[in-house]
Amino acid sequence: MSTLRSLRLLGAVEAGTVTGTQLETYLGDAGRKSELSVLLASRGQSRRMAASPLTMAAITTSPSAINIVFQSATAVTNAACAAVVASPVAMNSVANSVASLNVLGANPISWGLFNASPYYETNVRTVLANFAGVNPAIYPTVTSIITDPIAMSDVAGTAYAMNAVVASPATTALMAGSGTAMALVTGNAIAIGIVAAQPTAMGVIANSTTAMNAIVASSSSMTSMAAQPGAIAAITSSSAAWTSFMGSSYFGANLPTILANIIGVSPSAFPTLASMIASAATLALIAKNTAAVQALSSNSAALTTLASSSNIGIILSSAAAMAVIGPNSSAMGSFLGASGAWSGLFSSSIAKGYIVSTTALVDIVAGNSALITYLTGLSAITQPASVPDGVVGTFQTFNGTQPSKVLILAVKEVGIAATYSDYNLRGSPQAGTAAGATLHVSSTAWTTHVAGYTGLTWDFQGIGITAATLPIIKYVDMT
């Protein structure tokens, strides 16, 4: 009987014999409200109402009917709700009704349709004020609400009001540009959590220096951002935001979560940096993502772990990863200091390219006797292809057989007499504190000279032009 009565009422509304005012009166009865809710729970009946201009005209002028529509909307039965938010009259009516707004805010389906309405921005000031519990008449613009510490405090303290803010890019931009507003938002765990969870809003936040300054100074805000993949995606998409984020004193504490969300793995499955390094598949995801490598290499303990990991080759063979780590002398120094990493380092042409051209790294090699011993085992010996030209200060090509990039370990003279000669070596580029120095060498013993040269040339500091005055180099192929 109740279903039949609700269908009769709907039929009368469709026929135009029951107006919106009359419908509001009918819905003063709890039974009638329940019956309409049952109809709206039916996909077919929801679509039927949405398809009737007379029905929607009545519903949009009945606050009770609108509230029932908002309460009843689901992912599959939302046609009537979509029709309501397509009405400028209904949108204005809802914006001015605290009761309707609270019903709306409680249903994510209805709220999503409401804030996607073409009339949302027109009404956002009223929506924001009523959600926050401030008088809309006192605040003529959205800016006046956002920039007023009292009103904004109420906004930040009300979840529905914060949802209204982040649903509006223009309002989010006003908030992001206000230090006062951002201080209130970052000071409220619920408020900053809502911001972090809204990808569109985070696109605005990440491009605001004011907003990012407030976030990186707050422990709870950093934790909220770290936990949201969308927030991390927005931050890493802005070089300025990412630099600021990594510079936060709270970055390290959240690093495993941040890194997991950058590469799209479960933070609970990989709760530590060591667990990520231990997984070849996960480390491979890190290796191809610049922001992920930057995050990982910001942690000295992680670099130490990586240096002794059997998976280090994944990083060393990745051009993307080495573009970050190669120029980072601290990171590369960690690798050079770990004997377990040497094989990988000196098997990777990418890694060797950074070592041979970086003075700090060549000097690290020079200062590590165990590493020198290891490299000696990889070394080869060669000498120039032609005798000295007899012109001091004119550099000759070393020969046509040695690699284009070499890490020289030691030098001696080819002759058999116990005499000394002076030589200079040069490269473009050349690296190492010793590079380019005048070498006073004999034929009886190797003289240590650890330096990196690309396109090696040489010059004999004398007038002899015999084969006896040729230098011999002990070198490692760095190509």
Image: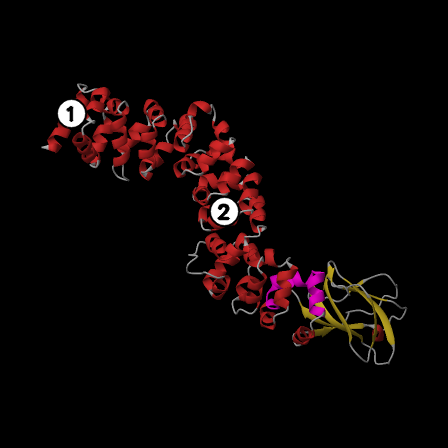
Q: In this view, does 34 lie above or below 403?
A: above
**Is 337 situated left or right of 231 in this image?**
right
> Where are the magenta residues, as a range?
345-366
**Is 457 situated left or right of 6 in this image?**
right
Does the magenta-highlighted stretch encompass residue 350? yes
Q: What element carries label 1?
A: helix
- Residue that mark 2 sits on: 221
**Structural distance between the alpha carbons of marks 1 and 2:** 53 Å
**Is 321 situated left or right of 10 in this image?**
right
Q: Can residue 187 be seen in this view?
A: yes
Q: Quadrant of residue 90?
A: top left
Q: What element carries label 2?
A: helix
**Residue at coordinates 26% horizontally, 39% vertically from top-left?**
76
Amino acid type indicated by mark 1: Gly
Does the magenta-highlighted stretch encompass residue 85? no
Principal SS element in the magenta part?
A: helix
Question: Picture coordinates of residue 93 (x, y %)?
Answer: 33, 24
Q: Earlier in the sequence, mark 1 or mark 2?
A: 1
**Residue at coordinates 16% horizontally, 32% vertically from top-left?**
31
Q: Can residue 401 be seen in this view?
A: no
Disc 1 crowd, CA 10 A, few/some/many (<14, 14-19, 20+)? some
- Residue that mark 1 sits on: 11
Task: Give the position of the N terminus as an image quadrant.
Answer: top left
Amino acid type indicated by mark 2: Ser
Q: Is residue 287 above or below residue 423?
A: above
Question: Picture coordinates of residue 83 (x, y %)?
Answer: 29, 28
Residue toward you, 258 or 463: 258
